[in-house]
Amino acid sequence: MQSAKRDYMFFVGTITACVFLSNYSFAVVLEILLCDLSAECPADGRTWVPLGNNCYCFFHLPKSSTIEDVREACRVNVPSADVVSINSEAENSFVTDYSHRIWNGTKDVWLGMSFNVDTDSLTWFDGLDVVYTNWMHGAYSEDTPVDMCAILHTGSGKWEKVSCEEVSEKAVVCETPMNPPKEKVAANNQALLSAIVILSVVVILVGSTVCWFFYQKKYSSSTVFTPFNYYPPFSTPNSDETVLVDAEERE
């Protein structure tokens, strides 16, 4: 009895291990597949650096440009891009630190900021209010001209007001949200996902069959299930009882 129980537990453990390994393999393939469906930065020939849910492109225009020239350059092949807007200290540090890897020396970087005459306040080009600021000491006052824009000094990370009409040579940092998964890629991966699901089921069945085969080969003399005896609901009378019944019927 103990031997049969031990064999049965071994069989169940073997089948469970086979199913687990098959499902693990399927999960690994599925994870690799879903990586293709994740958001990504634009692929327009320029280098975009991801941070959070946004992508950033650092470059230098070959000539002096206004803020509108810079905005147009950001939107080349990427309509959702615009001049960088900085909404946290971490983002400000990222732009400052990464610019040192791109350019030698310190640069002045355009910020996507302007004065909104309707709300009488500073706003980013993406429509968000300016909440986080990092102005140089004495660089900002309430007396703000209508054509006010801003730049970031990469040497200190501090901001300074400048005229939006100023024509000067400045570095450019563009920002855009990450691209959503492409529909074409998603459709192709959907078909591949269905094929992998079917394949995984086949692998599980084959793996279970192989495990059963090796189990039977190794424990062919063992009994997995305890046999049981069949007892009929009615017993046949013995010979003495039959004779007694016949004698009573004759009387």
Image (cartoon, grey):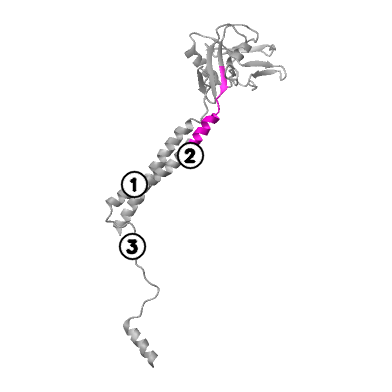
**Label 2 SS:** helix
- Residue 248 found in image quarter: bottom left
Q: Position of residue 110 (x, y in %)?
A: 59, 13
Task: Give the number of the disc on residue 227.
Answer: 3
Neighbour tally class for label 1: few under 14, some 14-19, many 20 plus, Cα within 10 Å? some
Looking at the picture, does residue 96 appear above or below residue 231? Answer: above
Q: Position of residue 100 (x, y in %)?
A: 49, 13
**Cα distance, mark 1 to mark 2?**
25 Å
Highlighted magenta segment, given as a residue range: 174-191
Please tell me whether mark 1 sits on a helix, a strand or a loop: helix
Which of pointers 2 and 3 indicates the residue nearer the eye? 2
Q: Is residue 17 left or right of residue 145?
A: left
Residue 117 relative to residue 13: left or right: right
Badge 1 or badge 3: first in the primary sequence? 1
Dot 3, crowdedness within 10 Å: few (<14), some or many (≥20)? Answer: few
Residue 244, compared with residue 208, is above or below; it is below
Q: Residue under label 2, please give it.
A: 194
Which residue was labeled with disc 1? 210
Query: Amino acid type of disc 3?
Result: Pro
